[in-house]
Amino acid sequence: MRKPRDYDAELKALTDKARQLKIRKTSQLGELVNATGADALSAEMLAGALLDAATTTDAAKKEAWRKRGAAFFSGNGKGARTGTGDEPRGAAAEPGRAQLPLGEPGAA
């Protein structure tokens, strides 16, 4: 006789995993904001820029943003942040910190 499935335990495990993934994504987005230098912007300005990016339908603009982001993640100087220059591009890859997979296909 087969053992009955514990649907409640499976649902709890899936809920916990989804919560962990959401926390990880939020943390990585914060690291991305810091790594790009966008943490120097006011919350209102950053929100406005993100809203503009999320609602734009201009395919050429999106492709330009994608290329610049890909250059940032590959370490190419073209996409690096424009800040004081005293912090290296790889600041997000400090020991003990997770790499940001946001620029990889399929990453969410």
Image: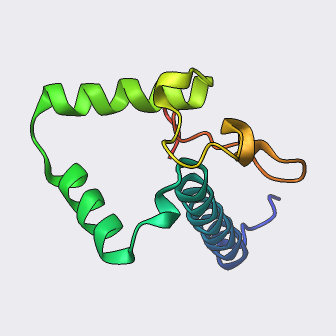
Colour mode? rainbow
Q: Residue at x 27, y 26 (%)?
A: 64
- Report the number of discs: 0
**Left or right side of 94 for 16:** left
29 or 19: which is nearer to us? 29
* Residue under the point 23% across and 61% down: 51
Query: Which sits in the foreground, 102 or 68?
Result: 68
- State the image coordinates of residue 40 (x, y, percent, origin top left): 49, 65
Q: Looking at this view, is 25 or 49 the one in front?
A: 49
| Residue 102, x across and y down, in percent | 53, 41
Find the residue positioned furthest to the left: 57
Q: Is residue 104 visible?
A: no
Residue shown at the point (23%, 53%) measured from the top left: 54
Task: Name the quadrant containing residue 31.
Answer: bottom right
Above or below, 41 relative to 84: below
The image quadrant that residue 45 belongs to is: bottom left
Q: Nearer the viewer, residue 61 or 4?
A: 61
Q: Position of residue 44 (x, y in %)?
A: 30, 76
Q: Is residue 104 left or right of residue 31?
A: left
* 2 lies above or below 107: below
Q: Is residue 81 left or right of residue 14?
A: left
Rendered view: 50 above or below 93: below
Query: Residue 65's x, y, as percent?
Result: 31, 33
89 w.r.t. 16: above or below = above
Indicate the quadrant where residue 101 lies: top right
Q: Quadrant of the N terminus?
A: bottom right
Let me know if residue 19 appears in the view. Answer: yes
